[in-house]
Amino acid sequence: MAVNVQGMKTWSKLAKNKRRPSEYEIVTTNLQTRNRHRDQAYELSPAPDLAMNEWYRKNVFDSPLQHEDWEEFRDPDQLIYRVYTRTQDVQESYVDGLLDDHNEIDHDAGLKPEWLDVLEHLYTPRRYLQTALQMGAAYLLQIVPASTLTAAAGFQEGDEFRWLQRIAYRTRELQTAHPERGFAIKERERWEKHEALQGLRELMELMLATYDWGEAFTALNLVAKPAADETMRELGSTARHYDDHLLAALVDNQMRDCDRSRRWSTALVEFCAGHGDNKSVIQGWIDKWMPLAEKAIITYCAALPESEGVADTAIERLHAYHRSLSISA
């Protein structure tokens, strides 16, 4: 007598879709173990006073940002590791080509003294800013409540580390071309003390001390990172006026990564906006963090040459991004 035994199907989480899962879904969906039991994060002991369990319960399960199934989120780019590394390898080859081409024409030696002042104070210290952005993405990677979100945050962390490395590389090149200046020597001092950078530093330090996953995502991806990206965009625009076409091209390439971060962040807001009080929760967090972001943009852009109206333009772009989100009235 034949017995019909029905067990769990391969990709059972995705079986309801009635189609073969995509490669993206197979390698990013339902991979976490830390969300299976509310009182046993990372499948640790269920002891109620275990610090990791308390931390995860408070900052993930009890976050004001709620959804019945975070694993249903999908990155609009459906990015996986194989595609990410292949794409970024092409971009890195392009950047290497830019650097080689400009080195051949002795680009750095021809930079104007007044522009070198700007690079010393507003560009090379940004490797500390990039470190903060990378650390923020790394925290999201560790705490977000779905593996599809983990993947998106992980690729964002890779992007930030990529530009941290490139700023460090350019710092060394500028030091070689202009050893009489403070390149590769005074960046930390300027990050900690230069007036133009203190708004960004305050924003980043407070963002890194934000532990609720929903607010950490909002503070980083919807406010702090876009604000930092807009200051970089303005620096790149100014670079063109001072014939630093290398920096302008580097910034253009960096904005590709920034745009991808905004795409998945926008998709996440859209994904959860229709559930409970999520719209008002996210808007409340944006309202909380925006004064710090506007201050950061204003203080940074004020130090740029020919800075009139630059901060207003950057802030308006940030507001336009927020208006594009699903929480807008």
Image (cartoon, grey):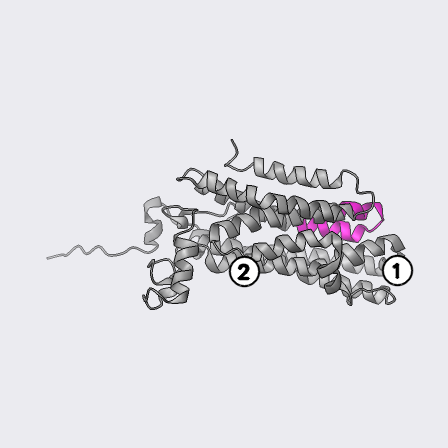
- In front: 282, or 12? 282
Q: Secondary structure at mark 1?
A: helix
Q: CA distance from mark 2 to mark 1?
A: 37 Å
Q: Residues within 10 Å of mark 2 (few under 14, many from 20)?
A: some
Residue, x 19% and y 56% (percent of image)?
Answer: 5
Report whether 208 appears left or right of 116.
left
Residue behind mark 2: 138
Q: Main secondary structure of the magenta part?
A: helix
Amino acid type at mark 2:
Ala
- In front: 70, or 125? 125
**Image spot of residue 126 (x, y percent):** 71, 57
**Image spot of residue 55 (x, y percent):** 42, 61
- In front: 321, or 38? 38
Does the magenta segment cover residue 246?
yes
Q: Is residue 41 visible?
A: yes
- In front: 97, or 215? 215
Amino acid type at mark 1:
Ala
**Image spot of residue 137 (x, y percent):** 55, 57
Residue behind mark 1: 109
Residue, x 47% and y 38% (percent of image)?
Answer: 280
**Image spot of residue 247 (x, y percent):** 77, 53
Report whether 63 appears left or right of 218.
left
Frontmost of labels 2 and 1 is 2
Report whether 264 appears left or right of 203.
left
Report whether 50 appears left or right of 90.
left
First to last magenta residue range: 236-255
